[in-house]
Image (cartoon, helix red, strand yellow):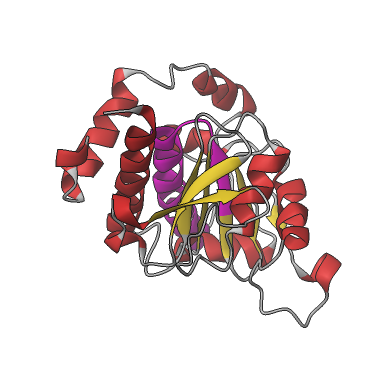
Amino acid sequence: MDKLERVKRDLVIANRILAMEGVLDAYGHVSVRHPEDPGRYFLARSLAPELVTPEDIMEFSLDGTPVGDDRRTPYLERFIHGAIFEKRPEVTVALHAHTESTLPFGITGVPLRPVFHSASEIGASVPTWDIDEKFGDHTNLLVTNMAQGRDLADRLARNAVCLMRGHGFAAAGTSVSRLVTTSIYLAKNARVLLQCLNMGGTIKTLHDGEIAERAKMDPNGSALRRGWEYWAKKAGCGDML
């Protein structure tokens, strides 16, 4: 299997896993930077993530233009991906989702911080981007051009995750399996934190030092691979590993 085929297969696996785990539903999308041309990226055609196959993967330049003569319908919000890849040269994977458990934190001002160890990769700071700050209150909340995508990427900055007010979140990472793991535990962390808020009392989130120590763990270690293999088989695409 050559490098490009492996990248596309991993992208399909990521779509299937994130759909199975409820991070993505009929909407949302995940992309991978082209491993040989950093000015391009791969993203499925406009299709529900659970249905994506290798044949559905399209190639784009960073400004969202399909490469070649590909006339299939792309995702409207592909500009999120190109803008993140443009701003963050080290990023190889980007994600946009509407995961319900994260939504309250993007509209209330209550900070979304990790409260258990597996969620540490969301980082100590999760900013919120509000489209109306720059583009007014007559948008449809979708990121449909590069100007909006770049503004979102600016708010994401060096963070792993950025909430989007009344919409969802965007995330960035350096490997497909790692970003899948981060996104799954982002959703779990949001649910746990909401339960804690409903219980009242003092909530003890992870310390900055604990988050920093966990960031030193091997991103390609056996623990991460174990999760990736488990979720892939659970999502019915273990044969693509």
Is 179 inside the magenta-drawn segment?
Answer: yes
Query: Seen from this angle, which residue lies furthest front?
Result: 69
Q: Say which of 209 and 18 sits in front.
A: 18
Is residue 105 placed above or below 84 in the rendered structure? Answer: below
Tell me which secondary structure the magenta stretch mostly adopts: helix
Quarter of the picture containing the N terminus is: top left
Q: With respect to residue 164, does 173 lie above or below?
A: above
Residue drawn at x 77%, y 47% is: 154
Write down the quadrant of residue 5 in the picture.
Answer: top left
Residue 130, percent from left and from top: 74, 64
Residue ranking furthest to the bottom: 138
Give the quarter of the figure containing the C terminus. top left
Give the percent coordinates (x, y) of residue 162.
64, 50
Q: Nearer the viewer, residue 127 or 16?
A: 16
Q: x, y (%) of residue 127?
A: 69, 49
Q: Is 233 left or right of 71, judged from the image as shown?
A: left
Question: In the shown orientation, is residue 232 left or right of residue 66?
Answer: left
Q: Residue at x 73, y 41 (%)?
A: 157
Does the image show residue 202? no
For residue 128, above or below residue 137? above
Q: Depth check: give the residue in front, 199 or 65.
A: 65
User: Would you say residue 163 sits in the magenta stretch?
Assistant: no
**Is residue 111 at all visible to an observer of this figure?**
yes
Q: How many marks?
A: 0
Above/below status of 183 relative to 74? above
Residue located at (63% from left, 36% from top): 124
Identify the image quadrant of residue 88: top right
Name the foreground residue: 67 vs 80: 67
Residue 203 x, y percent position in the rendering: 55, 46
In the rendered structure, which segment of residues is drawn in magenta? 170-198
